[in-house]
């Protein structure tokens, strides 16, 4: 028999968006957890360590493309404009654009991680003393509008890191359409997209030899233990990532090592040995596939820059 959640547990679940998302995801036939919850303070630090791994090519490759073309990417934004970044994290790559823009534009980093935003703001305030910074803590897919004071300014959107690849193509298209209305009709968007490539290289990037990606994946369970209740034995799960060729995406999973049971706010769950919790998708697009998605979402592809090995693409959309 299933235990009924107690009234105080039900109240907690209803108040708490994270608890609701966890219970909903774990109740599905293929258990899932939303990947935006990776990024608490621990998760954001682990992601920063991932970006420094030899196997994780996207960050350094995209940074190389930004360094080579920052001036062309920022040329269209006039003085008095604003650079609006979605999922800004540490804002390290942003410095490559701010080196061009900091004298003439405000910077609006948007992220679900308050810790990442606070650290980035402190560092940028030192590096660019005159820069007007407007951090926004929140889910970029739920943002109803930008602060009123920014409405009249010309805007350049920046969405690096291939973070849009963590959404299904249907959700990615909805998000691009939403960004179009946030940035208004004259706004442009510079967006980084990881390209389709050799399976072995992709799988190495998500199964690094130092185990940092595994720790990043397991942090989702650790976060549930910290913030909701101590439900999981982390030793009872392993990290797995593989390329799903049919869907064109890397999938990350947490695999149950044995048959097990756990409960969250009175909701009981069972897992068989080998059963998985699907924690992240990372879609890879060819240049033409991504341009087609952008067109369907109301954007016009203008230019695309890639690295010499065509591992990564940075698109300009108008
Ligand atoms: N832009 C950085 C960080 C990429 S990691 C880079 O290119 O290296 C993805 C970032 O997006 C994290 O900082 C995470 O906290 C943020 N993020 C993920 N989903 C989000 C959402 N729905 N709304 C706002 N931020 C989100
Ligand atoms: C943020 N995002 C685009 C990363 C990716 O590559 O999908 C997150 C990540 N997951 C595992 N490693 C990095």
Image (cartoon, rainbow, N blue to C red):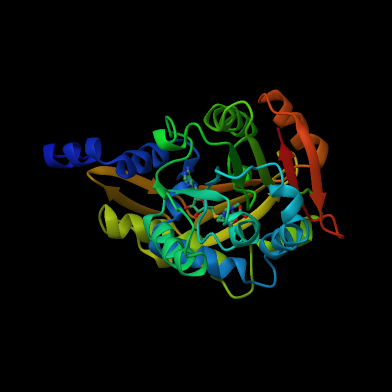
Please give left or right for residue 158 compared with residue 15 in the image.
right
Residue 11 sits in quarter = top left
Closer-to-camera residue (104/276):
104
Closer-to-camera residue (231/175):
175
Closer-to-camera residue (29/224):
224
Whole-percent x, y for residue 122 in the image: 41, 66
Whole-percent x, y for residue 185 in the image: 62, 25
Please give left or right for residue 224 compared with residue 165 in the image.
left
Closer-to-camera residue (315/227):
315
Residue 304 sits in quarter = top right
In this orientation, does residue 5 appear? no
Q: Which residue is found at the position 51% from the left and 61% from the top?
A: 90
Q: Which residue is found at the position 22% from the left and 43% from the top?
A: 266
Q: Indicate the quadrant of ligand 2 in the picture.
A: bottom right
In this orientation, does residue 280 appear? yes
Vertical position of residue 124 compared to residue 158: above or below: below
Vertical position of residue 224 compared to residue 55: above or below: above
- The residue positioned farthest toward the left in the image shown: 7
Whole-percent x, y for residue 285 in the image: 75, 42
Vertical position of residue 181 compared to residue 43: above or below: above
Q: Which residue is found at the position 63% from the left and 44% from the top?
A: 165
Whole-percent x, y for residue 258 in the image: 45, 59
């Amino acid at each position: 028999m299933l235990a009924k959640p107690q009234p105080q547990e039900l109240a907690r679940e209803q108040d708490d968006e994270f608890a609701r998302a966890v219970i909903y995801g774990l109740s599905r036939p293929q258990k899932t957890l939303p990947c935006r919850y990776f990024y608490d303070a621990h998760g954001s630090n682990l992601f920063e360590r991932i970006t420094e791994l030899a196997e994780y090519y996207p960050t350094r490759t995209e940074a190389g493309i930004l360094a080579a073309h920052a001036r062309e990417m920022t040329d269209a934004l006039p003085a008095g404009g604003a650079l609006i970044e979605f999922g800004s994290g540490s804002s390290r790559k942003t410095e490559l654009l701010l080196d061009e823009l900091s004298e003439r534009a405000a910077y609006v980093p948007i992220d679900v991680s308050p810790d990442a935003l606070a650290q980035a703001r402190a560092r940028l305030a030192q590096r660019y003393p005159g820069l007007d910074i407007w951090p926004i803590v929140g889910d970029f897919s739920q943002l109803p509008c930008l602060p009123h004071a920014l409405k009249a300014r010309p805007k350049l959107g920046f969405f690096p890191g291939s973070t849009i690849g963590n959404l299904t193509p249907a959700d990615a298209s909805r998000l691009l359409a939403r960004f179009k209305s946030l940035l208004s009709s004259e706004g442009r968007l510079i967006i980084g997209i990881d390209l389709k490539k050799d399976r072995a290289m992709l799988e190495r990037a998500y199964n690094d030899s130092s185990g940092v990606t595994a720790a990043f994946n397991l942090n989702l369970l650790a976060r549930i233990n910290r913030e909701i209740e101590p439900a999981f034995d982390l030793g009872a799960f392993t990290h797995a990532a593989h390329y799903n060729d049919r869907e064109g995406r890397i999938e990350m999973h947490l695999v149950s090592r044995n048959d097990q049971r756990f409960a969250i706010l009175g909701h009981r769950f069972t897992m068989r040995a080998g059963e998985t919790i699907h924690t992240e998708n990372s879609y890879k697009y060819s240049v033409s596939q991504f341009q087609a998605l952008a067109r369907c979402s109301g954007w016009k592809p203008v230019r695309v820059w890639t690295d010499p090995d065509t591992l990564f693409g940075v698109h300009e959309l108008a």
